[in-house]
Image: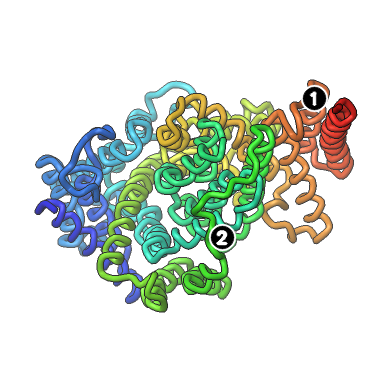
C-alpha cells in the first residue's frame, strides 16, 4: 500500500470518527459543522474520484481498494477544499454576525467562495457526469441575466455579489439543509448498511434466500430478485449493488437456463428498485421527508406497499419467464444449506435491524436511531466467532461508508447550490405554470410530463440528483391538481427510481449487461418491460393516494385499493411478458390493455371490470393449455 493510499485511508477514518463523535455528543452550530463536512467531502472526493472514468483494463497499485491513484493535481485541489472550512471557522464571528446582502463581501470572500463552488461543481462532474454541473451553471446564468431574458425565462435575478453571498456565506446554499442531511442521516444510514455487510449480514441473507428458493421453479431467478432488492435497500445504490450481487446472481441465473439479457435486466431492476425498501431507501427518501415536513418513519411506512408491489411484480415476472423458457427446479450446490443452522449461527445479526426499527417506532429521530443501531453492530457481532468484527472489518466498513458518502454528499451539496440559486429567481413557479398549461388542465398528461422530465433528468445521475432537480418543478405542478405535498414528492421519487433502468442511458442495466456478457440495449429494452410496473405505480398513487397509507380511509376501502392494484400489476406483468401459461393472442392483449384504464378511473365498477378482464384472460390461458394437454393425451398411441 503506497503512502498516498495510507494518507487517504487515514483521512477517511478521521472523518468517519468525527461524524460518529458529533452524533454522540451533539451536532455543533450549522456554520461550524457543515463547512467541515463539505471540506471533508471535497478533500476525499478529489482523492477518490478520477478526472476521467477509468476503463476496466486500467491497472492500479493501490490493491484495488480505491478507484484510482490520485494525481498531484488532485492533491492540490483536495488541499484547496480544506481552505473553505478553515476560512469560515477562522472568521466565524464576522461571517455569522454580518448583515446578509447588506455588508459587502471582502476580496477573500470572493476568492474562497468562487474556488469552493468551482471545486464542488468539478466533483459533481466526476460523480455524475456533465448533466448536473451544466444544470447548476445554467441556473447561475439564468439568475445573473434574469432581467434581460425573454419570455418565461425572465426573472427578477440577482447580482453576482448577492448570489455569492447567498450561496457561500449563509446556511442556505452550500451549507444548507442538504449538507446537514448528508452529514447526519445519510452518513449514518450508509454506515449502518456497510457495517452490517461487514459483519456478515450479506452472506447470511444470500444463503438464506438461495436456500428458501431451492425446490421452486426458477429458484435462482427468484433468489436474485429477493437478494438484490434487499441488498439494494442496504446499500442505497443501484449500480453499486449490481456489481456486488450480480457477480453471483447473474451467473447462477445463466446456469439455470435464463437468457443473458433477462438475467441482466432482472438484476438491474431488482438492485435499482430496492432503494425504495427501508431502512436506507437511498438519500432521496430523507429528502422527501425534509421537503414534505414529515418524519422519515412516515416515509418508510408509506413506501412499504409500493415496494411490495415492486417485489411481487419482479418475482411474478421471473416465474412467468421460468414457465416460458421451460426452466424447472434448479438445485445448485450452494443451495444445500440448512436454514435452521444458519439462523442458529447468525440470528444475532438481525438485532441491529430490530433496534433500528424499535427506536423509529418509539419516535426517536432517524439520526439517533441509526447511530445506536450502527454502533450496536460491533458488540453484537462478537456474540459469534463467525461474525466477529476485528480491526480489519471495522476499517473496511468505515472505508466503504466514506466512499459512498462522498459520492452522495457531493451530489447533495451541488444540488443545494442549484436550489439556493433558484430560490432567488422564482423560475420554479414559472415552470410549474408551464407544465400545468402543457397538460391542458388534466392530471394524467401532467403525470406523464413530470415522469418523463424526471426520468430524463435522471439519465446517468443518482436517484438523489434526479429527485432534487425534478422536485423543484414537478412536485409543485402536481400539487396544482390537488395532490398533497407528501404524495407529490413521493411520486417524483418513484419516477426518479426508474431513470437508471430506462433506455437509452440505463446505467444499472448496462452494469448488469457487462457481467452477463450481452448487448446493452437488448438488456435495456428487456429491463424496460420487466420494470414497467415501476412506471405505472406512481400514476396509481396519484389517483389513489390510499396506496401510501392503506388504513387512512378505512379497512375496506384500503382492501379494495390493494386488490385493484394487485389486479393491475398482475395484468401488466402478463401483458409485458406476453405470456401466462402460453403466448397471448391479440384479443387477450386487448383485454389486458383495457383493464389498465382502471388505474386512471378508480371506482368500484372499473375495478370490478378490470378484475373481470384479467380473470377472463387467465382462465382462457388455463383452458387453452388444458385443451392442448388433453389433445396430446388423446393422440398418444
Q: Position of residue 451 (x, y in %)?
A: 58, 34
Residue drawn where x is 30% and y is 61% of the image: 398
- Viewer-nearest residue: 442 or 52: 52
Say if 513 sits above or below 391 in the image: above
Q: Secondary structure at mark 2?
A: loop
Kindly tell me whether residue 253 is visible in this rendering: yes
Q: Residues within 10 Å of mark 1 (few under 14, many from 20)?
A: some
Is any part of residue 423 visible from this angle?
Answer: no
Examine the image and state in which quarter residue 571 appears: top right
Residue visible at 64% across and 49% down? 306
Which element carries disc 1, helix, strand or loop?
helix
Label 2, on which residue? 294
Above or below residue 211? Residue 263 is above
Q: Quadrant of the C terminus?
A: top right
In front of the other: 604 or 194: 194
Residue appearing at x 38%, y 43% in the figure: 415
Tell me the number on the disc at residue 129: none
At which x and y percent is residue 43?
20, 51
Closer to the observer: label 2 or label 1?
1
- Residue 578 in the image, given as x and y percentages of width and height: 71, 28
Q: Which residue is mark 1?
A: 590
User: Dot 2: within a 10 Å radius of its alpha carbon, few (fewer than 14), some, or many (20 or more) residues?
Assistant: few
Q: How many numbered circles are shown?
A: 2
User: Percent position (x, y) of residue 421?
Assistant: 37, 41
Q: Name, please, the residue furthest toward the front.
A: 637
Point out the tag, 2 or 1, that comes first from the N-terminus: 2
Amino acid at each position: 500500500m503506497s503512502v498516498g493510499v495510507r494518507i487517504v485511508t487515514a483521512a477517511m477514518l478521521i472523518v468517519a470518527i468525527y461524524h460518529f463523535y458529533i452524533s454522540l455528543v451533539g451536532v455543533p452550530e450549522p456554520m461550524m459543522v457543515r463547512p467541515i463536512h463539505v471540506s471533508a467531502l471535497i478533500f476525499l472526493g478529489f482523492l477518490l474520484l478520477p478526472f476521467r472514468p477509468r476503463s476496466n483494463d486500467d491497472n492500479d497499485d493501490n490493491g484495488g481498494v480505491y478507484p484510482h491513484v490520485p494525481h498531484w493535481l488532485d492533491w492540490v485541489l483536495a488541499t484547496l477544499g480544506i481552505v473553505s472550512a478553515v476560512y469560515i471557522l477562522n472568521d466565524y464571528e464576522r461571517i455569522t454576525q454580518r448583515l446578509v446582502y447588506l455588508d459587502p463581501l471582502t476580496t477573500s470572500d470572493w476568492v474562497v467562495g468562487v474556488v469552493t463552488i468551482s471545486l464542488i461543481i468539478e466533483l459533481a462532474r466526476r460523480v455524475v457526469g456533465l448533466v448536473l454541473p451544466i444544470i447548476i451553471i445554467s441556473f447561475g446564468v439564468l439568475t445573473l441575466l434574469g432581467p434581460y431574458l425573454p419570455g418565461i425565462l425572465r426573472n427578477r435575478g440577482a447580482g453576482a455579489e448577492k448570489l455569492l453571498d447567498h450561496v457561500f456565506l449563509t446556511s442556505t446554499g452550500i451549507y444548507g439543509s442538504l449538507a446537514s442531511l448528508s452529514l447526519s442521516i445519510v452518513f449514518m444510514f450508509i454506515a449502518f448498511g456497510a457495517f452490517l455487510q461487514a459483519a456478515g449480514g450479506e452472506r447470511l441473507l444470500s444463503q438464506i434466500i438461495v436456500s428458501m428458493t431451492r425446490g421452486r421453479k426458477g429458484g435462482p431467478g427468484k433468489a436474485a430478485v429477493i437478494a438484490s432488492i434487499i441488498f439494494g435497500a442496504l446499500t442505497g445504490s443501484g449500480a453499486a449493488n449490481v456489481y456486488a450481487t450480480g457477480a453471483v446472481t447473474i451467473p447462477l441465473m445463466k446456469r439455470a437456463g435464463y437468457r443473458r439479457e433477462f438475467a441482466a435486466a432482472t438484476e438491474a431492476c431488482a438492485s435499482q428498485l430496492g432503494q425504495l425498501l427501508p431502512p436506507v431507501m437511498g438519500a432521496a427518501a430523507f429528502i422527501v421527508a425534509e421537503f414534505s415536513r414529515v418524519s422519515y418513519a412516515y416515509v418508510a411506512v408509506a413506501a412499504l406497499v409500493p415496494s411490495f408491489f415492486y417485489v411481487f411484480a419482479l418475482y411474478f415476472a421471473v416465474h412467468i419467464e421460468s414457465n416460458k423458457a421451460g426452466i424447472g427446479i434448479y438445485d445448485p450446490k450452494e443451495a444445500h444449506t440448512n436454514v435452521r443452522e444458519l439462523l442458529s449461527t447468525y440470528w444475532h445479526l438481525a438485532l441491529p435491524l430490530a433496534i433500528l426499527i424499535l427506536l423509529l417506532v418509539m419516535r426517536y429521530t432517524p439520526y439517533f436511531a441509526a447511530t445506536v443501531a450502527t454502533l450496536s453492530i460491533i458488540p453484537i457481532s462478537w456474540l459469534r466467532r463467525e461474525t466477529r468484527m476485528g480491526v480489519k472489518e471495522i476499517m473496511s466498513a468505515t472505508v466503504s461508508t466514506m466512499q459512498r458518502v462522498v459520492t452522495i454528499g457531493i451530489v447533495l451539496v451541488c444540488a443545494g447550490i442549484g436550489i439556493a440559486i433558484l430560490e432567488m429567481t422564482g423560475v420554479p413557479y414559472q415552470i410549474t405554470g408551464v407544465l400545468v398549461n402543457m397538460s391542458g388542465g388534466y392530471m394524467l398528461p401532467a403525470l406523464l410530463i413530470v415522469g418523463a422530465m424526471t426520468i430524463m433528468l435522471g439519465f446517468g445521475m443518482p436517484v438523489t440528483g434526479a429527485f432534487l432537480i425534478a422536485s423543484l418543478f414537478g412536485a409543485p405542478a402536481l400539487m396544482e391538481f390537488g395532490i398533497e405535498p407528501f404524495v407529490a414528492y413521493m411520486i417524483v421519487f418513484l419516477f426518479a427510481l426508474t431513470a437508471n433502468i430506462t433506455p437509452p442511458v440505463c446505467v444499472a442495466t448496462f452494469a448488469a449487461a457487462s457481467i452477463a456478457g450481452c448487448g446493452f440495449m437488448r438488456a435495456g429494452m428487456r429491463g424496460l418491460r420487466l420494470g414497467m410496473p415501476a412506471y405505472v405505480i406512481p400514476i396509481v398513487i396519484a389517483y389513489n393516494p390510499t396506496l401510501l397509507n392503506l388504513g387512512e380511509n378505512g379497512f375496506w376501502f384500503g382492501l379494495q385499493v390493494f386488490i385493484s392494484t394487485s389486479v393491475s400489476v398482475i395484468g401488466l406483468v402478463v401483458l409485458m411478458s406476453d405470456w401466462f401459461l402460453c403466448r397471448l393472442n391479440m384479443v387477450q392483449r386487448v383485454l389486458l390493455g383495457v383493464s389498465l384504464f382502471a388505474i386512471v378511473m378508480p371506482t368500484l365498477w372499473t375495478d370490478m371490470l378490470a378484475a373481470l378482464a384479467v380473470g377472463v384472460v387467465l382462465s382462457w390461458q388455463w383452458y387453452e393449455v388444458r385443451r392442448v394437454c388433453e389433445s396430446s393425451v388423446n393422440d398418444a398411441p
